[in-house]
Image: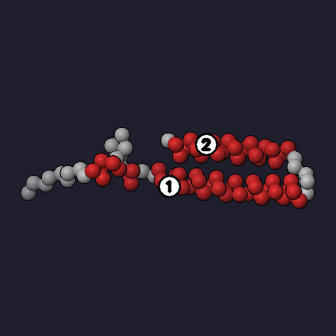
Amino acid sequence: MLRFAQAETRADVLMATSDGVYLDETRQVNIIVCDVLMWAFAFILMVLRLYTRGLLTRAIGSEDWVLLAAVVSSTTLCGVIIYR
């Protein structure tokens, strides 16, 4: 018995990357979701820390500025990962 290869539909062609790997076979979506969730968690914690240190105790230290710089660099990295 002869088996014929399935004809590629328009949806199959749109779901394939330039390497010929289908997007549902990759973990790209999982990586992006994990990256965004971890970034959101870190951002919320940073905002809460700066709120308590800045408004409640009026004592923002150098470690808070380092934390802010780390979140900014993390945001940049998150954007690069999503862009690619």
Judging depth in this view, the residue of 26 and 49 nearest the camera is 49
Q: Position of residue 67 (x, y in %)?
A: 77, 47
Q: Which mark is residue 15?
A: none
Q: In the image, is 35 to the left or to the right of 23?
A: right
Q: Which residue shows up at 36% across the image and 40% down it?
A: 18
The residue pinned by badge 2 equals 77
Residue with the most extreme front position: 55
Q: Position of residue 26 (x, y in %)?
A: 42, 50
Amino acid type assigned to the residue bearing label 1 in the image: Asn
Rounded to the nearest whole Å, what is the CA distance between mark 2 and mark 1? 16 Å
Query: Residue drawn at (64%, 52%), measured in percent from left and top?
Result: 39
Neighbourhood count class around disc 2 (C-alpha, 10 Å): few under 14, some 14–19, many 20 upward: some
Report the colour scheme: secondary structure
- Residue drawn 81% across the image and 53% down it: 50
Give the SS element for disc 2: helix
Q: Is residue 46 left or right of residue 18?
A: right
Q: Which picture quadrant has residue 56?
A: bottom right
Name the residue tied to disc 1. 30
Looking at the picture, which amino acid does disc 2 mark? Leu
* SS type, badge 1: helix
Mark sitting earlier along the chain (2/1) = 1
Given contact means CB atoms under 8 Å apart, are the residues at marks 2 and 1 in contact?
no
Quadrant where the N terminus lies? bottom left
Looking at the rendered structure, the number of numbered marks drawn on it comes to 2
For the point 20% across and 53% down, the residue is: 6
